[in-house]
Image (tube, rainbow, N blue to C red):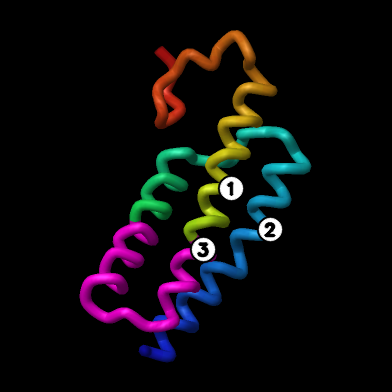
Amino acid sequence: MSIFEVLMLVCFGAAWPASIYKSYVSRQTAGKSILFLWIIFTGYFFGIIHKLIFSYDLVIYLYVINGVMIMADIILYYRNRKLNNPEEVKGDSFGRRK
C-alpha cells in the first residue's frame, strides 16, 4: 500500500461530494461533461480491477467509494438532463443528441 496512492484517492474523493451536492441542488447539467465523468469512472473501475488481480489491499475501498460517488454524479447528470429537456433526451449515452 502506498501512502501516495491513498492521499491521491482521498484528495480526489474530497471533491466528489461537492460535485454531487451541486448536481442535486442545481438540477442543471450546465458545466458538467458526461464524457469526463464516464472516463473518470472507467479509470476507477480499472484501478479496482488492478487491486483485485495484482495488489489487493485496503486501498481498494477508496477506489470503490470514489467510484460510487462518481456513479451518483453520473445518475444525477441524466436525471437533470431529463428535467431540463424532457423532449430532447433522445441522445446517446455520452450526452450527444441525435
Dot 1 alpha-carbon crowd within 10 angstroms: few under 14, some 14 to 19, many 20 or more = some
Q: Amino acid at mark 2?
A: Ala
Please identify the quadrant where the N terminus is shown.
bottom left
* Residue found 55% across the figure and 12% down from its top: 88
User: Helix, strand, or loop for circle 2?
Assistant: helix
Q: Amino acid at mark 1?
A: Ala
The disc placed on residue 66 is 3
Q: Position of residue 84 (x, y in %)?
A: 67, 22
Q: CA distance from mark 3 to mark 1?
A: 10 Å
Q: CA distance from mark 1 to mark 2?
A: 12 Å
Is residue 12 one of those drawn in magenta? no
Mark nearer the N terminus (3 vs 2): 2
Q: CA distance from mark 3 to mark 2?
A: 13 Å
User: Helix, strand, or loop for circle 1?
Assistant: helix
* Residue found 75% across the figure and 39% down from its top: 26
The disc placed on residue 72 is 1
Q: Is residue 79 left or right of 36 when viewed as pictured?
A: right
The disc placed on residue 18 is 2
Mark nearer the N terminus (1 vs 2): 2
